[in-house]
């Protein structure tokens, strides 16, 4: 028997699967598993990244609103309280990686005028615009790619606080 005839016979066995211990489609299950795994894993990874960004925004706005309201009610004057509140919001947002300016994301309302009237209420609202990660800007015209996350904190001015005396 020549070598050529042996090789042809073996090649025929491999092609038809006859007499061999490996089926002709051996290894295709691994390829299918890997390709389907990647197709199914990518949306899951994107969902986790997006939810993590939204959770960071929720933590940032909640902490910043709480700190801003507290900064206003513990200040000596309305102006000092507002300055401290803006600083607190800026720090709270930067802590979670958001660059929103405190002037555009902070709203403080008071139940009385002046703001630090004893037994008054101070409401601090912080809003952050979260851009969905990895979405090109031109999609924003068709599909909204921004999510607004807002937190609100109401704090009371101390009932026994001394009133500011005008000079």
Image (cartoon, rainbow, N blue to C red):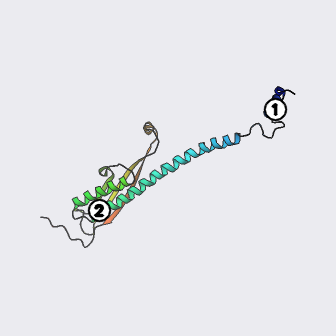
Image height check: is 47 above or below 25? below
Residue ID at (54%, 47%): 45
Q: Which mark is residue 71?
A: 2
Number of residues whose C-alpha sits closer than 10 Å to that of mark 1, classed few (under 14), some (14–19) or many (20 or more): some
Q: Which residue is mark 1?
A: 10
- Front disc: 1 or 2: 1
Please identify the quadrant where the N terminus is shown: top right
Residue ID at (23%, 60%): 80
Contact, CB < 8 Å: mark 1 with mark 2? no
On the image, which quarter does residue 112 sit in?
bottom left
Please identify the quadrant where the C terminus is shown: bottom left
On the image, which quarter does residue 38 sit in?
top right
Determine whether the residue tagged by mark 1 lies in a helix, strand or loop.
Answer: helix
The single residue placed furthest to the front in the displayed view is 2
On the image, which quarter does residue 61 sit in?
bottom left
Is residue 134 rendered to the left or right of residue 86?
right
Is residue 153 rendered to the left or right of residue 21?
left
The single residue placed furthest to the left in the displayed view is 167
- Percent across and percent down for residue 99 are 35, 48
| Number of dots carrying numbers | 2
* Earlier sequence position, callout 1 versus callout 2: 1
């Amino acid at each position: 028997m020549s070598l050529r005839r042996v090789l042809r016979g073996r090649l025929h066995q491999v092609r038809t699967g006859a007499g061999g211990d490996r089926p002709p489609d051996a290894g295709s299950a691994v390829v299918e598993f890997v390709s389907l795994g990647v197709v199914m894993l990518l949306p899951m990874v994107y969902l986790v990244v997006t939810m993590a960004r939204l959770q960071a925004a929720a933590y940032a706005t909640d902490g910043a609103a709480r700190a801003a309201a507290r900064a206003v009610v513990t200040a000596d004057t309305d102006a000092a309280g507002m300055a401290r509140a803006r600083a607190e919001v800026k720090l709270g947002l930067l802590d979670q990686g958001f660059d929103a300016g405190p002037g555009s994301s902070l709203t403080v309302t008071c139940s009385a005028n002046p703001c630090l009237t004893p037994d008054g209420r101070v409401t601090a609202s912080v809003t952050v615009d979260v851009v969905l990660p990895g979405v090109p800007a031109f999609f924003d015209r068709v599909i909204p790619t921004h999510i607004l996350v807002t937190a609100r904190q109401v704090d009371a001015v101390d009932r026994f606080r001394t009133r500011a005396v005008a000079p």
